[in-house]
Image (cartoon, helix red, strand yellow):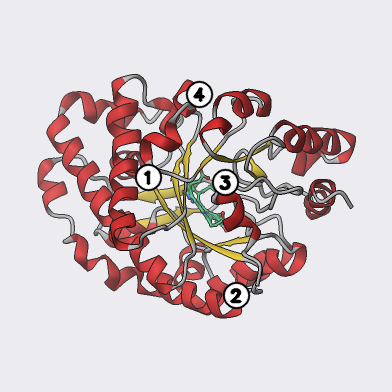
Amino acid sequence: MTEKTILRALKGEILPTPPIWMMRQAGRYLPEYRATRAQAGDFLSLCYTPDLAAEVTLQPIRRYGFDAAILFADILLLPQALGPKLWFVEGEGPRMETTTTMAQVQALRPIGAIHDTLSPVYETVKILSRELPKETTLIGFAGAPWTVATYMIAGRGSKDQGAAHALKAADRETFVALIDIITEATVLYLSEQVKAGAEVVKLFDSWAGSLKGEDFTDFALKPAARIIAALRELHPGLPVIAFPREAGEGYIGFGKAVGADCVAIDNSVTPEWAAEHVQPGGCVQGNLSPVHMVTGGEDLVRETRRVVDAFRKGPHIFNLGHGITPDADPANVQLMIDTVRGA
Ligand SMILES: Cc1c2[nH]c(c1CCC(=O)O)Cc1[nH]c(c(CCC(=O)O)c1C)Cc1[nH]c(c(CCC(=O)O)c1C)Cc1[nH]c(c(C)c1CCC(=O)O)C2
């Protein structure tokens, strides 16, 4: 059997048509997702019910034939497994019990205990590795330590990650202790996903862009490098995608510095810039703006072709620059795929 296209691109192969998948491809823009989510009751029950989580992972594969499936779960399940309560407020987003003192950091559960909470996620991966079409690559994931820490410290999402920056400035020892625990727990979590059948793992550092200078090195780059090195000891050759979102100049050389096979690019940089400055370092993933999944039409076709053309001279996985939004039209997703595949 010829190797799966995503794995070939991750090894550095330039394919005539880039393989394609989409961040948040299982999500509220799909009527079948909304139906399964209603059956589960709420978002977290959906994440922790393996049959249903596997079902929503498979839905966009059945509908569109993407080259990769991404495990249906959330980056906040890992911190929840360390102890803090997690819930989602409809129409607003996640809420979490805060962790801001050394006493609270020390009161987190031992990292080895995360599997008690997370075993349904591994079960979802096992179901998927049985049920996915043979050409589809299964991607596991986790949040990067800085991004996970921003939610643990603030107890919710925030525009500027102010609470995490404030703790870093006021009590660096506590902040570093928290980053270290998340880093170690993430290795265990991703390793278990790989044992269950994940073929690639992706680290989402959604708020990497708010780390500047040495902070970017210390809290985006170094933790990612530690996680990837530890995973490769356990799983030699494991392909890894890193996503230091809005890193800007920080994207340059990031893949090599952390040991990732591929760097995912957001929409704050142009595909031409990323092709020139990031792609020489290896495979890149991205970076059509998710807005086109809402607006569609000629703009979508033109910008999709622009992304494909910009990255044509190096290894590339086509994706959006960030997750598809709930107001997207499923027909626009099909138009994007047809445009990429030259239909
Ligand atoms: C920061 C972050 C989170 N989760 C994630 C990130 C990093 C990537 C990014 O920057 O988007 C990652 C994530 N979240 C989800 C996945 C599943 C796989 C996929 O389809 O990409 C993945 C990879 C499902 C989800 N995670 C969430 C949904 C929507 C939940 C619902 O059905 O109501 C989904 C499908 C909820 C979630 N989860 C999170 C937030 C802030 C929210 C609320 C915002 C929103 O509602 O879109 C935390």
Q: Nearer the viewer, residue 208 or 27?
A: 208
Question: Does the CB distance between marks 2 and 1 fall below 8 Å?
Answer: no
Secondary structure at badge 4 equals helix
Quarter of the view holding residue 53 = bottom right
Q: Is residue 104 above or below residue 130?
A: above
Secondary structure at badge 2 equals helix
Query: Are there few (<14), some (14-19), or many (20+) residues within 10 Å of tag 1?
Result: many
Q: Which residue is mark 2?
A: 39
Residue at point 17% right, 25% down?
170
Residue at point 69% right, 35% down?
313
| In this rendering, the label closer to the viewer, 3 or 2 | 3
Question: Does the CB distance between marks 3 and 2 fall below 8 Å?
Answer: no
Query: Are there few (<14), some (14-19), or many (20+) residues within 10 Å of tag 3?
Result: some
N-terminal label among 4 and 2: 2
- Quadrant of the rendering where the N terminus is positioned: bottom right
Query: Are there few (<14), some (14-19), or many (20+) residues within 10 Å of tag 4?
Result: some
Q: Could you say which disc has been placed on residue 144 in the image?
A: 1
Q: Could you say which disc has been placed on residue 248 in the image?
A: 4
Instruction: Tell me which amino acid carries mark 4.
Output: Gly
Label 4 and label 2: CA atoms lie apart by 41 Å
